[in-house]
Image (tube, grey):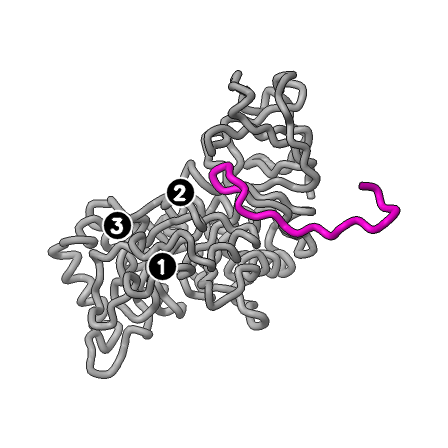
Amino acid sequence: MLTLTLTLAALTAAPTPTVADTVYLKPDFVHTPEGVAENVVVVVKDGKISALSTADAVPASAKVLELEGHLTAGMIALSDQSGMDAREAQDTTRMVMDGADLAHAFTRDHSDYDRLAAEGITSVLLTPPSGTLSGGRTALVKPGGAIVAPRAHLHLSFSSSLFTRGRKPTSYAGAIQMLEERMAEPKGGFALLKEGKVSALLQADTRAEATRAAAFAKRHGLAGLIYGCARVGDLAATLKDSGLGVALPAWNPGGNERIQASAQALHKAGVPFGFALDAPGRHPASLRMAAAACVRAGLDTNAAWSALTSSPGSLSGGLGRVGAIAAGFDADLVLWTGHPMELTSAVERVWIDGETVHEADLPEAEEGDDQ
């Protein structure tokens, strides 16, 4: 790990806030967009990061909260169904639900979100279950908190999971024809997509499906991302030219070589990517495990961490708000016992919008230990 010593000139100048309504966090290490830094104080006010400063620039009367460990931005999961109200998320009688907003299925106080926060996940992109040609508009939400982007993408599927006996479409050609017809005379969510008011979330499970999805996006000049395909790295050059990003499939124990290879290919080509979680069916810890597995396979550590924070922040509609410790961003923060890309590191504390939402149960000190 490269540790950067940041000078005061490289940091955002600290304002002169009222000490009573401002929190000053001083951890051992801060993970900023520029790298890992020491001697940095994160200034939080009204749920936002108002500034990064050095310890000697903090007002003398301020109470600085000394923290042991690494302070990072919270992780962001691309593609998730945690805490969604199934009645709002899917209608099995319809293949096209372009007018549906998954933000309406968001249940803020659902117990699923406690598990996410405990693993350092502070934002998730709600996506529809598979089986529809268009499952509606995705939403970027915070566990137990705010809706960051109520209409981030329009979901479009190029997956064979669509094809069920007795229902249209029954083939890839039929699915694309149905989508082309809606793009030719756009209404509802397709009108928003055509006008560039929402991006596209292109579901594809195989390399061939991802190729069809990328070609469709190119024909219509769509921005967005492809998700669900382990071999999407084979299309890295095409995706770079198109401007599309990627949500790599959710991690499973064993058999992830293609995902690891795709992560390296996408990084080398300069294609932004993140990881799907698809909880609650998978444990939230699998999000960080996916990135760590890619590092073990050769992916750059900083690239892997970006794929858990800043890249999905941009791809999911949270650009400039979530995914980084920087002035103006939401104070969605995680304190780790060590570097977050080391799986031996554990979550100590989590803040969302500056409020503590999780604190780990620390072991009690044994007799004779320093208190």
Q: Amino acid at mark 1?
A: Thr
> Does the segment drawn in magenta span residue 358?
yes
Which image quarter is the C terminus in? top right
The residue identified by callout 2 is 318
Q: Amino acid at mark 2?
A: Gly
Q: Which numbered circle lies on residue 111?
A: none
How much space separates mark 2 and mark 1, taking CA atoms? 15 Å
For marks 2 and 3, give the one nearer the viewer. 2
Depth check: 151 or 239 in front?
Answer: 151
Residue 199: x and y, percent?
30, 49
- The main secondary structure of the magenta stretch is loop
With respect to residue 370, does 212 lie above or below? below
Closer to the N terminus: mark 2 or mark 3?
A: 3
Residues under numbered marks 2 and 1 in contact, where contact means CB atoms less than 8 Å apart: no
The residue identified by callout 1 is 127
The residue identified by callout 3 is 221
Q: Which residues are magenta?
A: 351-371
- Residue extending farthest to the left is 185
